Structures are given as structure tokens and as C-alpha cells.
Image (cartoon, coloured by chain):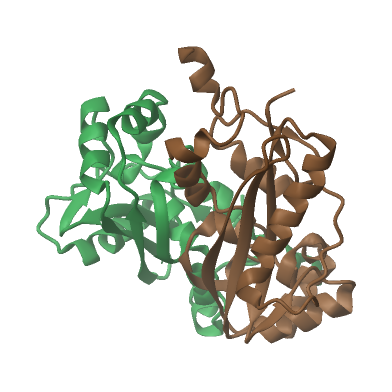
Chain colours: A brown, B green
Amino acid sequence: MASLILGSASPRRKKILRKIDLLFDIVPSIVDEDYANGLKPIHMAEYWAVEKAQNVSLLHPDKTVIGADTIVVLDDTILGKPVDDNDARRMLTSLSGKSHIVYTGVALRCDANGSEESFVAATEVTFYNLDKTAINRYVASGDPMDKAGAYGIQDTSAPFVEKIAGCYNNVVGFPLSQFVQLISQESVKNKFPVDNWFASDKEIA
Amino acid sequence: MASLILGSASPRRKKILRKIDLLFDIVPSIVDEDYANGLKPIHMAEYWAVEKAQNVSLLHPDKTVIGADTIVVLDDTILGKPVDDNDARRMLTSLSGKSHIVYTGVALRCDANGSEESFVAATEVTFYNLDKTAINRYVASGDPMDKAGAYGIQDTSAPFVEKIAGCYNNVVGFPLSQFVQLISQESVKNKFPVDNWFASDKEIA
């Protein structure tokens, strides 16, 4: 088993992290994100990223666990995953013709030595005006159901998005470049007992 | 054969257009983009998109052809595709720690009735500082060689990008959402002899 674990079942996060030659295994966290805990939106995703990393760390205390949580925030209201088609339609209608913010919190945790690092990335996303037909067609595809804000920027809802400001992969579900910046710092690397972060390190070693 | 043709050999453009249920075939254009023709950078990509669409239209005058051209512009200098590894390293070094603009021109052309539409999309991309090791590793992957500016934001160079402002798919090579806005206008649709733009139109018809 790799010394690094991605504590997320999200196929999007896995795919993004596979873009770099990071060595990791996957153990999904078992956490019930409660966005009604009174935290401000800007703190919420990072809080749940830490909770998820801690949850998986309990089972694998000697490993370093990556936790992540993505939320969509529209006018200070948090949109998580839709509960059903009506909820998805309601969310997409509220996002139509407006800008919202996507926050992804990322946490690194190792229980054995109590090390923890976390940050949150924010990207502004602006939607075109969406007509009912487009919303209904997209909801019928089933794509909205497992996604915060009821859309996936990388899927068939791509034409909904007029522009973004910030990191694209953050909107998909994992702010890859900021994460690479973090784990490129020697001080951060040394806090966690990871033998080889990258496959290429292994080749060199 | 579909009544719509994508006049581009780019696998990225094909993949982006497959996100929507557009019905099209592919006939690559045979055009030698000359970026030393004296046009300003903001007009260059649209000019070559039109040239490419016209080139394919000559062979398929009764079809509607989509042409596209992507350039990277740094401090008013156009970066096309690198000619070799050294050129790729030179381009990536020049992009390091700075912002540049990616322009993709898109054209629609039908020779039979002389109809033409075109636009250009612009996205600002900001790179982190890149060290030599990261640049050399990326150049060694071969990924830069067929790409304007010597990088593909969707591939292993994703961690180079701190942020973007504008359309992400435009940086990959095709501004999908602006294109969908264009072909959603009845006045544009009616100018081109396309039976069914979308597979779903066909189902309805």
C-alpha cells in the first residue's frame, strides 16, 4: 500500500490526481457532511476536508491522508449535492445568469505524528442564462446527482459556463496546482511520513 | 455524412465538441498557419480559423464547416506550436511566473451559399514560477510538441497554472460555450444548411 491515501470516493478527484505521478491509494471517508453547522461558507469546505482526512486517518494512522470537500456558494447560501431531480432543477435555476463561488477544501493528515495541513481554494464561476429545456435535459442525464451545485463543469453542462476566475480543477473537485505547490515545500513534505510522493522520486531513489 | 464538418485534426477539439450532442464529421484542413502576416494578435486566430474553414469548404461546398485556430500571446508576441524540444523549453521558460492570453478563433463557413460567421474568445492564464526540473520533465513527456505555447492545460502541465480568467475549454482549444451561444441563435442557424445540429433535434424531428 502507498504511504499516501486519497480519502475520497470521487472519480473526478482520482482523475485529477492521476494527472501528476503521485503515488496514492483510495480509501473513501465515511462522513456525513452537515453544512448547517453554523460555519461561514468560506470555512465550511476546509472544515469538512479536515474531518474527512481525520476519519480515514483513524483506520490508517501511519499513512498520510488527503481529504477534500467541495461546495458551491451562491449569495452566501451553500449548495451541496441535490437530493433529487427537483432539487437539481431548483439549484440550476438559481445559478442561471449569475456568478457563484466554488470552494474546495483540502487537508493532509497523519494520525501517527498528529501532522495536519489544510487550505481552501476559491473559483468564481459565471453561468449564462439557462432555459428550462437545457436544465431539464441536463437533469434527465443524471449527471447533476452526485455533484455539489448540481453540475459538473467537465461534463455536458460545460456550455452553461460563460467564464471562470481562478483554478479550473478546483471547480471539478480538486485544486491540483495549489496542492502541488503545498507538497513542493520541503517543510510540508518533512512533516508527513511519505516515502515517495511521486513515482519519479522512486526512480531517482 | 453529417451536414456539419469539424475542419480540424485536433483530438482536443473533437473531445470538447463530443461533450454536446452535436452531429459532425471530421475533415482536417490543409493550411500552413503563417503568424508573420502582420495581423495583430487579437485578429490572428480568427483569421486562421476562417482560412481553415474556407479550405475545407472548397472540398465540401454543400456542408457547413467549423474552423478553429488557437494561439498563445505573451507580451504581444505570438507563440504557436514549438518546432523542437529547445523551442518548447524556451516558450515554457518565457511563460513562467507570468500571465498570457490564449485566443481561439472559431469560424463557420458554407461555400454553397457563401455564409460565414466567426468570433474569437480570449482567456487569461497565469503560470506559477516553473523550475528547470519541472520544465525538462514536461518537455521529455512529449506533450508540448503539438500545442500552441508548448503546453496543454488539461495534461500533466496542469500544476503550472495558478489561475485562469475566462473560458477553460478555450485554453484547451475550443470555446465550447461561446460556440453553443452562437449556434443557438435562430438567425445563425438559418444561415447554414444544417439539417440537424444536435442528435436530440433528430429525435424530435
Can you tell which quarter of the image residue B19 is in? bottom right
Residue A118 to residue B193: above or below = above
Quadrant of the drawing holding the C terminus of chain B: bottom right
Note whether residue A176 is visible.
yes
Q: Position of residue A130 (x, y in %)?
A: 65, 82
To which quarter of the image does residue A139 belong?
bottom right
Question: From this viewpoint, which residue is outermost toward the left?
Answer: B38
Q: Quadrant of residue A204?
A: top left
The residue under the point 27% across, 57% down is B100
Horizontal side of residue A148 vs B103, given as left or right: right
Query: How many labels sit on residues?
Result: 0
In-image side of A151 versus A161 (left or right) = right
The vertical placement of B69 against A95, above or below, is above
Question: Whole-percent x and y of residue B181?
Answer: 53, 76
Residue B100 left/right relative to B6 = left
- Residue A171's spot in the image, x, y percent? 59, 61
Q: Residue at coordinates 35% horizontally, 58% vertically from top-left?
A: B125
Depicted B29 relative to depicted A20: above or below: below
Extreme-front residue of the structure: A113
Q: Nearer the viewer, residue A173 or A33?
A: A33
- Residue A152 visible in the shown view: no
Q: Nearer the viewer, residue B49 or A122?
A: A122
**Along the line of sight, which residue is nearer the eye, A205 or A117?**
A117
Question: Image point 88% across, 71% down: which residue?
Answer: A83
Percent of width and height locating residue A166: 46, 64
